[in-house]
Amino acid sequence: MKNSKQLLRVFVIFTLALILPLSTTLTTATAAVTQPEADTPLKKENLQKLSVKSVEKLDDGVKLDLGTNEAYIRVFADDLVKISVVKKGEKEYTSRGIAKTEWKTPKFSTKDSKDRLTLSTKELNVTIKKTPFGIKFTDKKGNVINEDYMGAGGTSGYEDGKPYVFKKTDKNEDFYGFGEQSGLEFNKRGKSIGHWNTDAYSYTKDTKYLYTSIPFFMGLKNEKAYGIFFDNTHRSYFEMASESDDYYYFYANGGKLTYYFMYGPEVSDVLDRYTEITGKMEMPAEWTLGLHQSKWGYTADEITDVAQTYRDKEIPLDTMHFDIDYMDEYRVFTWTQEYKDALKKLKSMPGFKAIAINDPAVKQDENYRIYQEGTKNDFWAKNADGTPFIGPVWPGDSAFPDFSKQEVRDWWAKNHDVLFDEGIDGIWNDMNEPAVFLDGGIYNHTMPLDNYFGYDDNKIIHTEYHNLYGHDEAEATYDAFKMHKPNERPFVLTRDMFSGTQRFAALWTGDNVSNWEHLQMSIPMNMNAGMSGISFVGNDIGGFASRPDAELFARWIQVGAFLPFARIHYDSDAKAAVKQGQEPWAFGPEVEKISKKYIEMRYQLLPYLYNAFQDSTETGKPVQQPLVYHFQEDPNTYDISDQYMFGDSMMLAPVINEGQTSREVYLPEGETWVDFNSKVEHKGGQTITVAAPLETMPIFVKKNSIIPTREVQQYTDQNELTNLTLDTYVTDKSEYTFYEDDAKSLDYQSGKFNETKFTVVNKKNEITFDQKVLKQNFKSDLTQYTLKLNNVNQPKKVQAANHKYKAVNTLEAVNATKRSYFYDTKTKTLYVSVPVEEKRTVKIK
Ligand code: MIG
């Protein structure tokens, strides 16, 4: 044993010696992407041939005797069933990704015949074919939503310990979801997808294993959607009609066969259910929706200088990030004095928040408190022989906390006072795959597969735990806020996720690259994250590895300003071939102006963005939405990878190709679309070409929308929100329910929020505006709504009951004059200032 440890040590040192110089001298373009060991294909000739021997009725479903195995089919809701196939006598399984385990079983009936057994709810029939065993889901009209594939020899079961399921594929069936995935296509039909959380520095469109594992997807056929969540934390594989057009299948390297089947038919219903099972995100603090700036390797002075430059140039910014440079030789939960001072200085400047990175690896150093405590308390992940696993990461040889243990999570949470006490507002969890700087052999950039977590009498082998490591670290970090900042909304940013991590953390998509392909890839990647319950997602703006040129940065900041999570972040200078900053002003005055314009737009749209997040907390709706989320009746939207909805009303069609100054845009059917820049209106159901010079990103607003906006601020809570502008595009009727709370505390959870519904109706010769208070439990500072009506004719009069509104000549005058209006003849825009207390209908004739 001693020998092997020594060997390991030699290996570690040797490998470190190899890796460290390489990573600092190689340019990013030539560095190979780390990937795990080779895939382990399913042996299709060895599939189990199961059949139902007998049926036992349960309160919430049925238990089937399959001979060597048993199946449980549990009805959790009219459109939700949990399927488990286990070895005889084994229990069903629920991973730590699951948020809800108690379901109120709805009424259902069972019909048992010789060949089949059918469970029926109000929305779904689940028919089980007995020989061979197979499951079919149909709607109440008898349409097949999804069914097991019988042609492979076995539909579901185990092959050499690998749980698998085969499903029939319809020729019209498309697939979305799977969390963070590489590739330029949004639609994942035809793809081989794998889940094994991997530190994939400088990945490409063809890299199979990225940082997260979200074994959930949605199938869409004949305009109807269903979802399947394979609740298995082992390395998993999804062959989505990649081998044959007739079937798809999924399997894992171990664990149990457990999946949840949910029926829409709306895409939005599926996502709502999936995020009910795995948890919805909580309301983010508003400051987290502002712009973030970050670089690996900012000196202490640079952090405050960059922040000050933002203010000097009047480019809005909320947050500076502290990368690993702030720690004392990369010891977690420590500081070097100069960065501590920089933080203090930053926090004394108006409106700045700070986020600190935190890595899981704890430096092996007998004189370091965290290492001492973890060692004394047996808190580390272990080698197969029971000794603590030690592997090199940034601090050198390190131990890895075993986050599967509650006591370790509590301890980890507790130590965050070291960061919070100095003024840190949010935590950024990196390297939590967990990444280890040992490649090849038994390592593949992480721990050996036979490492274990948990307790000696209840071991969780690394193969099972790997994909959950970051999830549990995120929970521990989330708990740190509960412990130290009990009435603040936590902000955890993580690189690693499993299904359900969205309830603790936001996701950034790791070490992307400053090239056009990555800008392109970021869009389908975020849309699929959104289709997997991860609404709070963003990519390093400008790209992390390597450096962008001016044009790429300009295009990237246009996209970046509308990311759910908007952070500019870039790699240390040591790894870049050229000296190039990635602050908005680093590319000269033209790009600075473009950056400022789009960042200001984000800040103007803050009420709209904040409300989109609020929506997500209730429905799981993405913030960056694929078109199919809204337009599933329009098959032209199914494969669109370069356009998306930002919230419910704005469609973005960014330019993502070098040298391009115009582009084609598909306008979904059934709507009228207003070009946000020119105000020209277009009918939906057609593709148009729009001009897009470098300073312009094409944006379209769906007609019959209201977009709440506000004044530009330098940071999100610079001013009280007193005047809300309702940017309105109305053909016949626009409605919007505006949510408002204190934007930072947890008081909203006890009902301290307001909801006001605005209705704008456009009749023949009259436009009316109504506001209706739905909920009022928060002390708002709002005094005025500025109703901004786009593309309307000049009114003769504006009146609410006996209040006559006064015509004024400028926008400033509208804002300064109670009950007034201004018509801009040039742009055909009408501004009406409506006091919040106006309870009568405002009539515009
Ligand atoms: O091994 O902390 O993805 O955002 O700047 C690299 C340094 C470690 C990887 C993260 C990146 C971060 C960097 N980290």
Image (cartoon, grey):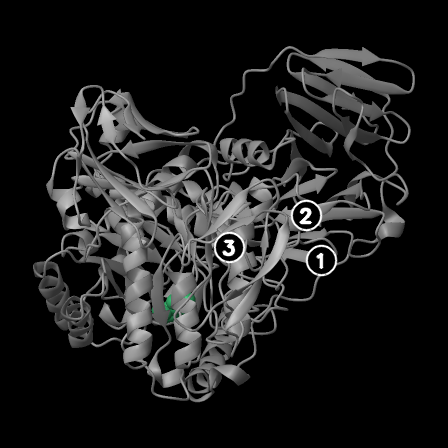
Residue 690 sits above or below residue 106 on the image:
below
Label 1, secondary structure: give it.
Answer: loop
- Cα gap from disc 1 to disc 2, whole angstroms: 9 Å
- Dots 3, 1 in contact, CB < 8 A: no
Q: Tell whether 400 sits left or right of 298.
A: right
Residue 191 badge: 1
Label 2, secondary structure: give it.
Answer: strand
- Cα gap from disc 3 to disc 1, whole angstroms: 17 Å
- Dots 1, 2 in contact, CB < 8 A: yes
Other-residue count near label 1 (Cα within 10 Å), few / some / many at <14 / 14–19 / ≥20: some
Other-residue count near label 3 (Cα within 10 Å), few / some / many at <14 / 14–19 / ≥20: many
Identity of the residue drawn at 12% across and 70% down: 337
Q: Quadrant of residue 586?
A: bottom left
Between 363 and 687, the one lying in front of the other is 687
Question: Disc 2 marks which amino acid?
Answer: Phe
Between 723 and 683, the one lying in front of the other is 683
Identity of the residue drawn at 60% across and 41% down: 631
Q: Tell whether 508 sits left or right of 479.
A: right
Instruction: State yes or no: Cβ of the residue under disc 3 lies below 8 Å from any atom of ligand 1.
Output: no
Question: Disc 1 marks which amino acid?
Answer: Lys
Expressed as whole percent of the image width and height from the top left, the position of residue 253 reads 68, 51
Q: Which residue is mark 2?
A: 175
Earlier residue among tags 1 and 2 = 2
